Amino acid sequence: MTAGGGGTPRPRGPLAAVLVAGPSMVPTLRHGDALLVRTGGRAVRAGDIVVAVFRSRPDLLVVKRAVRPADGGWWVRGDNEFVTDDSRVHGVADVWGRVVARYWPRPRRFSERLL
């Protein structure tokens, strides 16, 4: 499944593979990075990288950074300050899962220490 494209399937099961599409998470993630996403487990915290769906754009699966809880969902932003296709434009998002690792092209675990 690809995050950043329209009409994509939602993650199922405890782990899902997601491909990054687009530049919104540069420099942390780049177009084509392959991610492992945990759909259960601990609650999302501010600073986590998440896979989410904007309530105003339910057809769009995105990879963003969780900023703060808002209206029963999350305010999310991309790490690239020049790309604004995040909560600043689309509003609150519902989180589907938390990114735990990038497995291609450079394996890396994501935790609070690394971000």
Image (tube, rainbow, N blue to C red):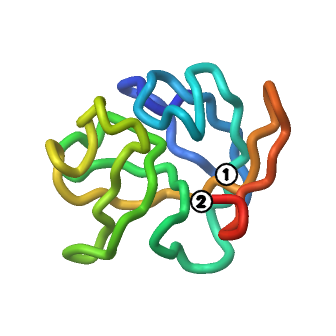
Q: Are marks 2 and 1 in contact (CB under 8 Å)?
A: yes
In the image, residue 90 sits, relative to residue 80, either above or below, namely below
Please, what is the three-letter code of the amino acid marked with disc 2?
Arg
Q: How far is disc 2 from disc 1 in space, using C-alphas?
A: 5 Å
Q: Quadrant of the C terminus?
A: bottom right
Q: Quadrant of the N terminus?
A: top right
The residue at the point 71 percent across, 60 percent down is 114
In the image, residue 114 sits, relative to residue 102, either above or below, namely below
Per the image, label 2 sits on a secondary structure element best described as strand
Between 10 and 76, the residue placed more toward the observer is 76
Q: Which residue is mark 1?
A: 37
Tell me: 42 left or right of 79. right
Please, what is the three-letter code of the amino acid marked with disc 1?
Val
The residue at the point 67 percent across, 51 percent down is 37
Q: Which residue is mark 2?
A: 98
Q: Percent from the top left, x then y, of residue 22?
A: 45, 22
